Amino acid sequence: MLLDNFRGAELKDPVMDYLLYSRLGPRVVRMRPLGAEDPSHRETRHEKHEAAHVVIVGGGLAGVSAAIEAVKAKATVTLIEKEKDLGGNSAKATSGINACGTRVQKSCGVSDDARWLERDTFVSAQGGTSDLGCVSMLASKSAEAIHWLIDELGIPLTELSQLGGHAKKRTHRCPPKADGTPVPVGYTIMQHARAAAQAIPGVEVKTSCTMKKLVENSLADGSKEVVGVEYLDGEGALHTLMCDAVILTTGGFGFDHSTGSLMQQYRPDLVGVPTTNGSFATGDGMRFGAEVGASLIDMDKVQLHPTALIDPKDPSAHTKYLGPEALRGSGGILLDQKGQRFVNELDLRSVVSNKILEHCDPLELPDGSKGRPWSWCVMNEESQEPFKGFF
């Protein structure tokens, strides 16, 4: 487009509107954000929906976002979460959310668009089967997602940083408090999301409820459709909840390394590797979906995060605190046991993880056995500043 040069962050004040001189005289034309749905189109789309009952299983950010949007489309929603509170792994996220072409980037003078995020996504998916349509959708809609969190939920995602695998400064996070104390972005987002879900009349939240199976109905042509869920409540009572649609937002399976687990089935080489996932990440939605005929794809694509924090009191613990990407993005460097730097800390997670495995010694455990290879993460005072209050 001829006007693309006027949208970017190169201008001190990017053009939002412009004057079109026509036969009818000068007219103001609005510059629509790329990838954003026109508000009038959204209203028309919502009006065409019929009233429905939707059950959403999983109370992380995906589940709560789906609930909020479903209510706008005339649905009543029952949100089921097996933990006592909403949040899931979304609440544990600490580094931020990546997006391109946002208002925040423009105000900070960062020139970025979907082409660059698509490229970085394809490059980071080494050995994967990235779907072009999905990657394009992710990139083109990323700014709208950030703006939704800011405008809809009131989350101040106004800080930017450039983390591993990204060619641009596009990781959005919350600014620190007035006293400099950092704000955990995932926890903050879920605080706002939880409050929004509980305040909407059309959303019923059921916590401490565990789905046991999807309920099916046979149709005249011999096919089947999902018409509800069975779940156990906090007191162990079994319930059947019928509905018009079920949305599964139950997350991954990184915690469960037990016999018969999805990890053992698809990535047996990672069984026994410590995890930063919560104990709820057992792949419930994937397993129950597969039972009713859902296709599972890319199940072997389990990401090994380079850094987690070792507790000296329990160095062999299966669950560890995440050493977030932001530690390295803020200037932390990784050293082996000889005090030598061995990797570009802002490289892809897969690259950094493999370099640790190649260059670092196994951890000596109290019982004399050897644990996983480990490294030092060294930070000067400046790089520590954003994390005061965390560690």
Image (spheres, grey):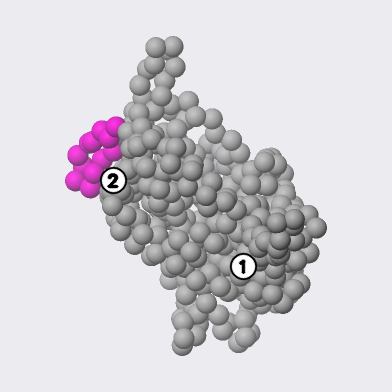
Residue lying farthest to the front in this orientation: 24
Residue ID for mark 2: 209
Residue ID for mark 1: 103
- Residue 79's place in the image compared with 120, above or below, is above
Quadrant position of the N terminus in the picture: bottom right
Q: Locate residue 120: give its quadrant.
A: bottom right
Residue type indicated by callout 1: Arg
For residue 363, side relative to residue 223 (left or right): right
Q: Locate residue 289: give its quadrant.
A: top left
Residue 140 is tagged as none
Residue 239 forms part of the magenta stretch: yes
Q: Nearer the viewer, residue 219 or 122?
A: 219
Calculate the distance from the C-alpha at mark 1 to the C-alpha at mark 2.
39 Å
Q: Is residue 308 visible?
A: no
Q: Secondary structure at mark 1?
A: helix
Residue numbers of the magenta segment: 231-242
Residue type indicated by callout 2: Cys
